[in-house]
Amino acid sequence: MFIINCKNYEEIAGDKIIEFVNIAEKISKKYKIKIAVAPPQHLIGLVANSSIPILAQHVDNSKIGSTTGFIIPELLKKSKVSGSLINHSEHRISEKEITELVLRLRELKMISVVCVKDVAEAKKYAKLNPDYIAIEPPELIGSGKAVSKERPELITKSVDAVNSANNKTKLLCGAGIVSGYDVTKALELGSKGILVASGIIKAKNWTKVIGEFSKAML
């Protein structure tokens, strides 16, 4: 799994998100790699009909109905959104919310990607059986310093922690990934995919960098 988190970067604003998702679609088909994109929340509707999975960057554990401003899983599902990131380091939520949201997304047959900052969290939240655990040490996010280079033991220990908790959840590696080498190294260490943001969104040539990362995953 290759997840691209667009965050709220200006490079992806407006109709640019359509261009970006079209590029991701073509490369996904070319290399037969599963690519998912998490657009800025307000732009999801522009690309929800894409042939690749579209994820929300965050989802709220709030009810359907009179809940102004909240992102509701059931409504995302009706808008053809495939799932959501949960507990990203830039949008941390409580353990109770994480637990309930993983269950709620599972019941809706939506993809859950729980972001964690360390091995202890990886082990704890893997017990909830989300589809993916994404390990991202906060200090390396957006740094250009890949966790696979700076802290390779964090990936291997997280793989062991997730595998010891259950055999369904897959580990993704994030934070500081800026090259195909970083991707290859993460997979060699046991990661089943990557979660990337600025390393792709801020690149001058989206086709080139998404293609490079995809080839590295083969």
Image (cartoon, rainbow, N blue to C red):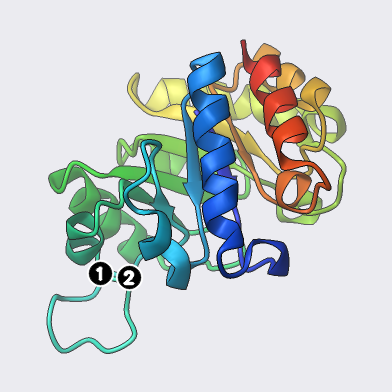
- Residue 102's place in the image compared with 132, above or below, is below
Badge 2 or badge 1: first in the primary sequence: 2
Query: Residue 112: image x %, image y %?
Result: 35, 45
Query: Residue 165: image x %, image y %?
Result: 38, 27
State which mark lies toward you, 2 or 1: 1
Tell me the SS state at disc 1.
Answer: loop
Label number found at residue 2: none
The quadrant of the image that shows the C terminus is top right
Frontmost residue, 79 versus 175: 79
Query: Residue 117: image x %, image y %?
Result: 62, 50
Q: Which residue is mark 1?
A: 72
| Residue 174 falls left or right of residue 80 | right
Q: Mark 2 and 1 residues: CB-CB less than 8 Å, in contact?
A: yes
| Residue 130 falls left or right of residue 192 | left
Tell me the SS state at disc 2.
Answer: loop
Near mark 1 (Cα within 10 A), the count class, few <14, some 14-19 or many ≥20, is some
Residue drawn 63% across the image and 26% down it? 157
Residue drawn 15% across the image and 89% down it? 66
Frontmost residue, 136 versus 164: 136
Hey, what amino acid is under mark 1?
Ile
Q: Quadrant of residue 159?
A: top right
Q: Which residue is mark 2?
A: 60
Residue drawn 58% across the image and 50% down it? 19
